[in-house]
Amino acid sequence: GNSVTQMEGPVTLSEEAFLTINCTYTATGYPSLFWYVQYPGEGLQLLLKATKADDKGSNKGFEATYRKETTSFHLEKGSVQVSDSAVYFCALSGGSGGSNYKLTFGKGTLLTVNP
Amino acid sequence: EAGVTQSPTHLIKTRGQQATLRCSPISGHTSVYWYQQALGLGLQFLLWYDEGEERNRGNFPPRFSGRQFPNYSSELNVNALELEDSALYLCASSLLSVGNTIYFGEGSWLTVV
C-alpha cells in the first residue's frame, strides 16, 4: 500500500535560515503529492500540491518538486520566519494501489523558528 | 465560500459514554473523510464517505462508526469511549476525483475522562 516517510523533527532554525524537510513516498502508479501545515491548536491547511512528475508546487515562499525518479517531494523555503513555526505533514493520494482517494500522511515534522 | 465546518469544537465525555461529532463539507463536495490525531500518533485515517456510502475504513474497532446524510454532511460516532480515544478528530472533504485536493476543518477535540 501507499506510505509516506518524512524527516522527523523537531527542527529548530533561526529566522531567515534555509529550510528543507525531506519527504519520500512509496506508491504504485502516479499519486498526487501534498504538503499540509498545522499551526498550534488549529486544523490542517493545504500548503502546496503537485499532481504529476516534475511539477513544482509553491505557496508563501515554500516550494516542493515532485521527483518520480527519487520518489521524493522535499519541502524548501529560502528564508523562514517566526510565523512559519508549525507542524508540516507530507501526504499523498491516488496511485494505483488500495484506496485512491484518501490521503496517506507522514508522521509530521515540528518546525520552530527562533527570532 | 464556507470551508469545512465541525462541531463541537471541544467535547468532554466520561469513559463508557458515546460521543457524536458533526461535519459539514464544502459546498459541492460529495466526499467526507474522518481522521484521528492522537498525541504522538500522527494522523490516522478513520472513515471515508461518498454519496452516502461508506467507501473505506481505517484500522479502528467497530465502535467507531459514522454516516453521511443526503446533504453530504456527516457524523462520527464513538461508542463505549476509552481514555485513549482522547484526540483531535479532523473532518475533511473533497470532490470525488483521484488526486483531488482534500480540505480540512478545524477539528473537534474529544477528551475522555
Image: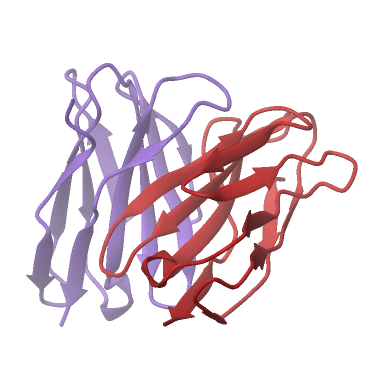
Find residue B24 and report its image quarter: top left
Q: Nearer the viewer, residue A113 or B111?
A: A113
* Letter of the red chain: A
Quarter where residue B91 is shown: top left
Work out whether residue B109 or residue A76 is closer to the camera in this orientation and state it: A76
User: Where is the C terminus of chain B found, in terms of image quarters?
Assistant: bottom left
Q: Closest to the observer: B108 or B61?
A: B108
Residue B67, compared with residue A75, is above or below; it is above
Image position, residue B43 (x, y; %): 46, 60
The residue shown at (25%, 27%) is B26
Q: Is residue A5 left or right of residue B45?
A: right
* Residue in the picture at 57% in, 23% down: B98
- Count numbered badges in the picture: 0
Q: Is residue A97 left or right of residue A102?
A: right
Q: Is residue A32 visible?
A: no
In the rendered picture, chain B carries what hue?
purple
Q: Is residue A69 left or right of residue A91?
A: right
Rendered position, B94 above or below A83: above
